[in-house]
Image (cartoon, rainbow, N blue to C red):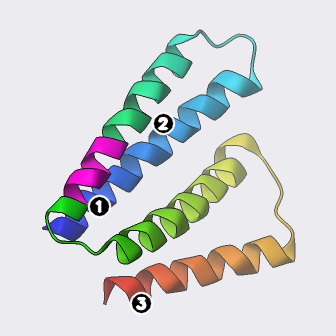
């Protein structure tokens, strides 16, 4: 159950970060993207702290959070915003996904 809570926290943070990018990349987007992004990132922080309180070790939580956020935000950047990754970046994201799988085992 704790891992599901941590995963939810990471997912919410990625959505919040994506809203920040939507706000920053275009002048046509309203400040609602910024405000909702801030709210979501704060909610994810509270859920993240709660997940550690419920028994996940902080080293595992921090590693999972960092790897998941980097992999997910990079993927969203490529898919939604057309950003290009070098081979080294692509390989790094692949290794992050492998690490997430190994942490989950």
Q: CA distance from mark 2 to mark 3?
A: 26 Å
Image quadrant where one finds the N terminus: bottom left
Location of residue 88 with respect to 27 vertically, above or below: below
Q: Callout 2: 10 Å neighbours few (<14), some, many (20+)?
A: many
Q: Which residue is mark 3?
A: 102
The one of 43 and 80 positioned closer to us in this rendering: 43
Displayed quadrant of residue 60: bottom left
First along the sequence among labels 2 and 3: 2
The one of 69 and 51 positioned closer to us in this rendering: 51
Q: Residue at x 78, y 71 (%)?
A: 89
Q: CA distance from mark 1 to mark 2?
A: 15 Å
Q: CA distance from mark 3 to mark 1?
A: 16 Å
Q: Callout 3: 10 Å neighbours few (<14), some, many (20+)?
A: few
The secondary structure that dominates the magenta segment is: helix
Q: Is residue 65 left or right of residue 71?
A: left
Q: Is residue 27 left or right of residue 63?
A: right
Please give the label number shown on residue 83: none
Indicate the position of residue 62 as horizontal and vertical percent values. 44, 67
Q: Residue at x 53, y 78 (%)?
A: 97
Question: What range of the chain is rendered magenta?
Answer: 45-51
Q: Which residue is mark 2?
A: 16
Q: Which residue is mark 1?
A: 6
Q: Residue at x 24, y 63 (%)?
A: 52
Per the image, label 3 sits on a secondary structure element best described as helix
């Amino acid at each position: 159950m704790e891992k599901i809570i941590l995963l939810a926290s990471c997912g919410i943070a990625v959505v919040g970060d994506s809203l920040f990018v939507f706000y920053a990349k275009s002048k046509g987007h309203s400040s609602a993207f910024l405000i909702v992004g801030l709210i979501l990132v704060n909610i994810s922080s509270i859920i993240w702290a709660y997940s550690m309180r419920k028994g996940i070790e902080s080293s595992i939580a921090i590693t999972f959070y960092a790897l998941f956020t980097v992999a997910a935000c990079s993927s969203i950047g490529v898919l939604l915003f057309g950003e290009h990754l070098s081979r080294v970046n692509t390989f790094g994201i692949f290794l992050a996904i492998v690490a997430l799988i190994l942490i989950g085992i």
